[in-house]
Amino acid sequence: MAYLMTIDAGTGSIRAVIFDTLGRQISVGQQEWSHLAEVGVENSMGFDFELNWKIAQTCIQQAITKAQIKSSQILAVTASSMREGIILYDKAGCELWGVANVDARASKEVRQLKELSLGIEEEFYASSGQTFALGALPRLLWVKKNKPSLYAKIDKISMISDWILAKLSGVIATDPSNAGTTGIFSLAKRQWESNQAKAVGIKDDIFPPVYEPSEVIGTVTQKASDQTGLAKGTKIVMGGGDVQLGSAGLGVVKAGESAILGGSFWQQIVNIDTSTLPPKDMSIRINPHVVSGLSQAEGISFFSGLVMRWFRDAFCQTQKAQAITRGIDTYTILEEMATQVPIGSYGIMPIFSDAMKYGKWYHASPSFINLSLDSQKSNIASMFRSLEENACIVSAINLENIYQFSGVSSQSLTFGGGASQGKLWSQILADVTGKSIHIPIVKEATALGGAMVAGVGAGVYKSIDEVAKELVVWERTIDPNKENFVRYQEIKEKWQEIYTEQLKLVDRGLVESMWKAPGI
């Protein structure tokens, strides 16, 4: 039997996942990691490449050991990672500096870029589909200003998934789906826009070669073999961004297909042609897909999964104890309770993530609005249901905003990630959006998407789109209740009005925003 490996570097942990060529997950080696603030640097989130490479080695070794296979049976290895995180290298290919995805140290540089030339952010966004807030340009400007001796040594830049592949193969390269999130990249050409770097005074010769996902970039070196246990000469295949590979792992590989990835954040994804122009109001993010010829319009709901975790840990100690006794997940108990709550959760309006406004992105202060003193109505069950409804409402608004500029809509959605395990949540999503919801058996789609591109690179599969349709198997389909859809339309409109008013409290400085993009 032959095998494929994906190394998935997420925000909170890194995993090495082994699949067989039928798409069955065989083993996982996983370990949490942390991205710590740099001393004296506000809102920083550094990437410790020395420690994190040791953690990656351990995960690879664990996965091989658990699989009880010879490493020579692994045909190819690829990688995925959190997007926006970058690594800088010197001429020898050694790491100089790195940051994780939501590093927000460069707020001043974001404002500086916007003031450099009227309309420059809009101009760059029209080409790249990205704003400055989490892009690489302001971070590079920060390095140039604050670490000039380090800046002078920069020879290459890559994404974190590219860094993993470089550690294995010695080849520094990148792919469109992840490099696109730097904002120094052309959606149409699927290549670097080095002229943008030059225009703002940044080195324009530091951008590595671009390979399409599934292309072989090299093989495992002897050094990497000694460090990881992978066999020398194993093919190293270009991977991609976690959301885009996750889309492939959900079978979302054709134009017009849509998905929602329900994790710590929720992403609403719609596949569009690369010729589709980004919206002029910069409300939605556009990224290259791992499938050549396609881009993805992306809405993002902030902290939808993390808010659930906070609510569980802050208020649901009784339910957590019950879950231990019953041997089930706490969320299962909370959903059982929430099924007894009517649509609209007795009017409770959660104020957490706003619909995406990529050009000016900030949120109201987190809160629950319209609670009553009736304990039969305002309680853990109804508040929990209101949070599930809210995540779906924000998703629906983002999908509607994508349709407004792209003209692309679908009758169904693929729903993946941990949230898709919630039966009530899946039904609410169908009712709020008015779309049929398809839920795959494999929920952790990013690693499977990686196995697909690794398999194409190894010659096991013909193409990403063909193998995606072959390997993705559906667990269930949920159809919307039309009456509920009508009622949720009214609730959605009311929520939008309330959220607008809540943002005004932030604007007046009376409360603190849940999150603000750098430069706001």
Image (tube, rainbow, N blue to C red):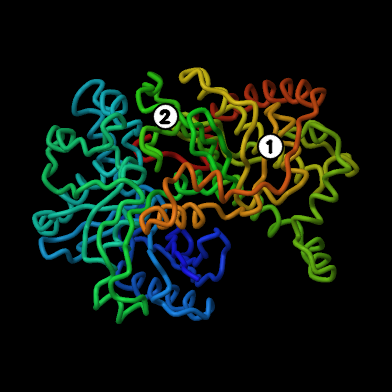
Q: How far apart are labels 1 and 2 at the CA level?
A: 31 Å
Name the amino acid type tagged 1.
Ile
* Viewer-proximal residue among 231 and 145: 231
Disc on the earlier residue, 1 or 2: 2
Mark 2 neighbour class, 10 Å CA radius: few under 14, some 14 to 19, many 20 or more = some
Q: How many marks?
A: 2
Q: Nearer the viewer, residue 128 or 21?
A: 21
Label 1: which residue? 437
Image coordinates of residue 368 in percent, x first then y, are 69, 39
Q: Position of residue 430 (x, y in %)?
A: 72, 33
- Relative to 468, residue 348 above or below: above
Q: Please state if 441 lies on the left or on the right of 5 as rendered.
A: right
> Which quarter of the rendered picture does the C terminus lie within?
top left
Query: Up-down: is 30 above or below 420?
Result: below
Residue under the point 60% across and 46% down: 262
Q: Residue at x 65, y 40 (%)?
A: 367
- What percent of the width, then of the height, locates residue 143? 19, 51
Q: Which residue position is annotated with label 2? A: 360
Q: Residues within 10 Å of mark 1 (few under 14, many from 20)?
A: many
Query: Is residue 130 found left or right of 192 in the rendered image?
Result: right
Residue type at mark 2 is: Lys
Give residue 394's quadrant in the image: top right
Q: Secondary structure at mark 2?
A: loop
The residue lying at 84 percent from left, 51 percent from top is 336
